[in-house]
């Protein structure tokens, strides 16, 4: 049975691509050197997959920043503000589209960035003009295909399909429908597929939008488009890939299409096997995504083989391909590097390399008779032993935690006073001006901070010396904020490497990898903690550092926490109980932390929930219950606070306009939002809903190295004040500042503070 992969991690096992990208952006590595690193990584990743048993390795999944941005560059979709005259998109322009820029070439903002479906990966949102022209100008995926062919690999080209590309993009006119650009786009796709067919026997078009709710009137255009693309692919077989959910509700889009193959995510929705097999054209192969591409747990081989047998009964084994459920982009590279993990838990895991081997094992065991072959028998026995060990392990259950969850009472979900009463108490306690200024929490993680953290973890810097270094760093951060004139300060989080990992290290039920990096966006990598057991808080997690910072200033100091939905979504979560059960345990632990921060004198506490929208199901019919449970867990964590304690939350880089009622139900006193890349477009949804509490729309994009002017931020504040009561507005950046350097941070915040002062005068609030 043939195997293939939908994609592989890009960064490298030692984050080689991250190092090269950041050296290139800093001017220490030229474009030729960067491309050489990328080419070497691709070769290594193809070899790793092939050696693990993958027959068709993917090309086109590798990117210097993002695959949706790659496709935009390939088809010449460059917004007008970048001044591109047509033709190939050079590397420096590609990065300006992703990151913005402020140099001799001009001052331009970056393209929008948001979450890739319900993952923590951020993609660059394509921007389409009303008269958008598409032309095959980029050579990236074609060059990768030639590289794979010349190196002797059997390759499958992988790229987003036309409907996912258009529907996840945006038009200059917000009311315009990007899908209407399909007739203009298809010729470029046809030309690209025709050229890829010269080097790749298979071409995969990814259409994860099929797991969402799509308008029924798109079904016929979809079918017509794919019939045209199948023809254009000529001798190559066209594989339509879906993932992140089932597609049974969208079968009219694909039923009977003469595809080379159809890939479905059987990990997310195994129930779709029966209806999908019934809808396949006789010549179409079925690709089963049986190995979880989103999490780090081993496949349950017995369950996977049962699903394989069901599909084989319906279409025959000769029409089945096997693969991970989705791209392995969302997993670390190789578990073999994790020599320090607890062996008991490590035995339950599989990273990208191991998942490729699992696909091979399932393929080798495809026929019942094959399961008696010695090598297959040994592999299945080892898999079964790992699963039995996990099911029986005492590491997973804590009866005290389970009793405490069972004892939660309804009053624990409600603040002790309604918002208007709380707002009056908070104004009296905090004495803030109109349009108060603040930041989202983190400040630059300088090379000195990173060196000290590494030295402390390696035992080269003692506890006392490290604590003294952190105190000095926090004192400097507080002093800088006072000098800038910010109204509500933060301690800067110098002691935290990652906003989720930091809390996981202080909660029971987690373990941690040393090399388990996954890409979040661009060169930004995160190392998600592994949630393998019941969660509780052995002791305070943030109180000492927050209280120390508060002692250094008379101004209000925010205590900073990561919310339960975000800790859940940005961890590798246990799959042996419902996700909601795990999140409720996290919420109880955070409730204890809120109480302790308040007892230590903190009168402003922020509970970040950027993953609230991201964690929702892809189909809207499933939203109501999921939103209600997530909101309840935020309220459970926050509602222990007294009325005069101001509770903030923060959200960014997702479509939050779709869930404004749920955000209101969270009942945070203040919400800060990413809003600058869309120029406050998001706020109209809050205004239409008459959002009752306070809002801090982000005034500048922290993912870009540019420093916005006072006038630019003042204009954004005035835009916000046109739709939101200015007495309920705050001024802040889009997100935390840990990835920025101090010079640009200081310059941008100085402009932000001045913009708020000017806006107060313009609005008659001074």
Image (cartoon, helix red, strand yellow):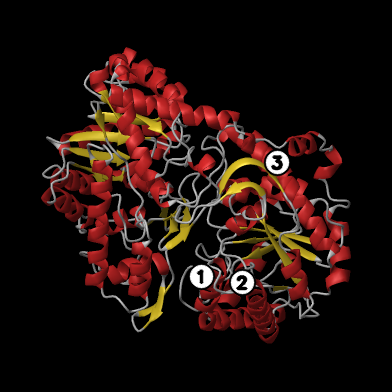
What's the distance in space between the residues labelled 2 and 3, CA to CA?
28 Å
Q: CA distance from mark 1 to mark 3?
A: 31 Å
Mark 3: few, some, or many residues within 10 Å (few <14, many ≥20)? many
Per the rendering, the mark at residue 503 is none
**Which residue is tagged 3?**
584
Q: CA distance from mark 2 to mark 1?
A: 12 Å
Quadrant the N terminus occupies:
top left
The residue identified by callout 1 is: 739
Please give the name of the residue rendered at 57% of the width and 32% of the height, measured from the top-left corner: 576
Front one among 570 and 87: 570
112 left or right of 144 in image: right
Ranked by sequence position, the earlier of labels 2 and 3 is 2
Disc 2 target residue: 494
User: Which secondary structure lies at badge 1?
Assistant: loop
Q: Quadrant of the C terminus?
A: bottom right
- Depth order, front residue of 339/100: 339
What SS does tag 3 mark? helix
Identity of the residue drawn at 41% across and 47% down: 335
Q: Nearer the viewer, mark 2 or mark 3?
A: 2
Q: Position of residue 124 (x, y in %)?
A: 41, 57
Question: For the residue carrying disc 1, how many other residues have a C-alpha within 10 Å: few (<14), some (14-19), or many (20+)?
Answer: some
Q: Tell me which numbered mark, 1 or 3, is placed earlier along the sequence.
A: 3
Residue 206 figure quarter: top left
Q: Residues within 10 Å of mark 2 (few under 14, many from 20)?
A: many
Task: Provide residue 112's location: percent of width, then percent of height.
Answer: 45, 60
Q: Secondary structure at mark 2?
A: loop
Q: Which mark lies nearer to you, 2 or 1? A: 2
Q: Residue at x 76, y 64 (%)?
A: 543
């Amino acid at each position: 049975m043939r195997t293939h992969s939908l994609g592989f991690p890009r960064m490298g096992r030692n984050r080689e691509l991250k190092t090269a990208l950041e050296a290139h952006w800093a001017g220490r590595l030229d474009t030729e050197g960067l491309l050489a690193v990328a080419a070497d990584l691709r070769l290594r990743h193809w070899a790793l997959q092939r050696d693990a048993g993958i027959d068709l390795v993917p090309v086109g999944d590798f990117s210097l920043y993002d695959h949706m941005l790659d496709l935009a560059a390939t088809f010449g979709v460059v917004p007008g503000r970048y001044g591109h005259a047509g033709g190939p998109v050079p590397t420096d322009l590609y990065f300006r589209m992703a990151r913005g820029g402020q140099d001799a070439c001009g001052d331009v903002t970056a393209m929008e960035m948001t979450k890739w479906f319900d993952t923590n990966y951020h993609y660059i949102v394509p921007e389409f003009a009303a008269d958008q022209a598409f032309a095959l100008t980029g050579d990236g995926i074609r060059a990768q295909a030639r590289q794979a062919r010349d190196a002797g690999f059997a390759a499958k080209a992988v790229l987003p399909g036309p409907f996912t590309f258009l529907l996840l993009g945006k038009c200059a006119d917000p009311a315009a429908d990007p899908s209407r650009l399909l007739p203009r786009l298809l010729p470029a796709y046809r030309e690209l597929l025709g050229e890829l067919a010269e080097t790749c026997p298979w071409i995969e078009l990814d259409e994860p939008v099929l797991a969402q709710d799509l308008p029924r009137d798109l079904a016929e255009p979809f079918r017509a488009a794919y019939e045209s693309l199948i023809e254009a692919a000529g001798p190559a077989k066209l594989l339509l890939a879906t993932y992140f959910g089932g597609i049974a509700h969208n079968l009219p889009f694909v039923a009977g299409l003469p595809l080379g193959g159809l890939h479905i995510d059987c990990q997310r929705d195994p129930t779709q096997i029966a209806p999908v097999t019934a809808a396949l054209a006789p010549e179409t192969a079925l690709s089963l995504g049986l190995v979880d591409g989103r999490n780090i747990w081993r496949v349950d081989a017995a369950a996977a083989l049962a699903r394989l047998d069901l599909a084989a009964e319906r279409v025959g084994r000769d029409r089945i391909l096997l693969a991970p459920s989705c791209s392995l982009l969302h997993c670390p590279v190789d578990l073999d590097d994790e020599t320090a993990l607890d062996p008991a838990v490590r035995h339950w895991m599989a990273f990208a390399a191991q998942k490729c081997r699992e696909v091979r094992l399932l393929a080798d065991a495809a026929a019942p008779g094959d399961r008696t072959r010695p090598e297959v028998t040994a592999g299945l026995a080892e898999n079964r032993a790992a699963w039995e060990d996990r099911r029986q392990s005492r590491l997973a259950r804590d009866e005290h935690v389970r009793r405490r969850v069972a004892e939660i009472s309804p009053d624990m979900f409600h603040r002790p006073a309604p918002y208007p009463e709380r707002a009056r108490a908070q104004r009296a306690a905090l004495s803030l001006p109109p349009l108060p200024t603040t930041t989202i929490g983190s400040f630059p993680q300088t090379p000195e901070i990173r060196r000290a953290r590494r030295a402390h973890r390696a035992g080269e810097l003692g506890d006392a010396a490290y604590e003294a270094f952190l105190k000095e760093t926090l004192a400097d951060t507080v002093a800088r904020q006072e000098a800038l004139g910010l109204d509500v300060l933060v301690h800067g989080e110098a002691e935290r490497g990652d906003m989720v990992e930091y809390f996981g290290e202080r909660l029971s039920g987690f373990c941690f990898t040393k090399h388990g990096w996954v890409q979040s966006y661009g060169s930004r990598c995160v190392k998600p903690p592994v949630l393998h057991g019941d969660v509780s808080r052995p002791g305070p997690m943030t109180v000492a550092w927050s209280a120390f910072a508060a002692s250094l200033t008379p101004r209000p100091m925010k205590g900073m926490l990561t919310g339960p939905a975000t800790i859940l979504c940005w961890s590798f979560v246990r799959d042996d109980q419902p996700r909601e059960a795990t999140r409720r345990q996290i919420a109880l632990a955070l409730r204890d932390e809120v109480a302790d921060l308040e007892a230590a004198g903190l009168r402003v506490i922020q509970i970040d929930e950027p993953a609230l929208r991201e964690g929702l199901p892809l189909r809207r019919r499933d939203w109501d219950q999921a939103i209600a449970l997530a909101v309840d867990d935020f309220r459970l964590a926050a509602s222990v606070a007294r009325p005069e304690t101001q509770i903030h939350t923060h959200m960014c880089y997702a479509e939050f306009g779709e869930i404004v009622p749920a955000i209101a139900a969270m009942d945070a006193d203040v919400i800060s939002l990413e809003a600058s890349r869309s120029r406050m477009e998001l706020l109209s949804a809050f205004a239409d809903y008459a959002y009752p509490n306070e809002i801090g729309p982000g005034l500048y994009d922290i993912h870009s190295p540019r420093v916005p002017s006072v006038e630019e931020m003042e204009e954004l504040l005035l835009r916000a004040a046109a739709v939101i009561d200015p007495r309920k507005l705050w001024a802040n950046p889009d997100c935390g500042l840990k990835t920025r350097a101090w010079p640009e941070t200081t310059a941008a915040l100085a402009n932000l503070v001045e913009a708020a002062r000017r806006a107060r005068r313009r609005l008659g609030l001074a």
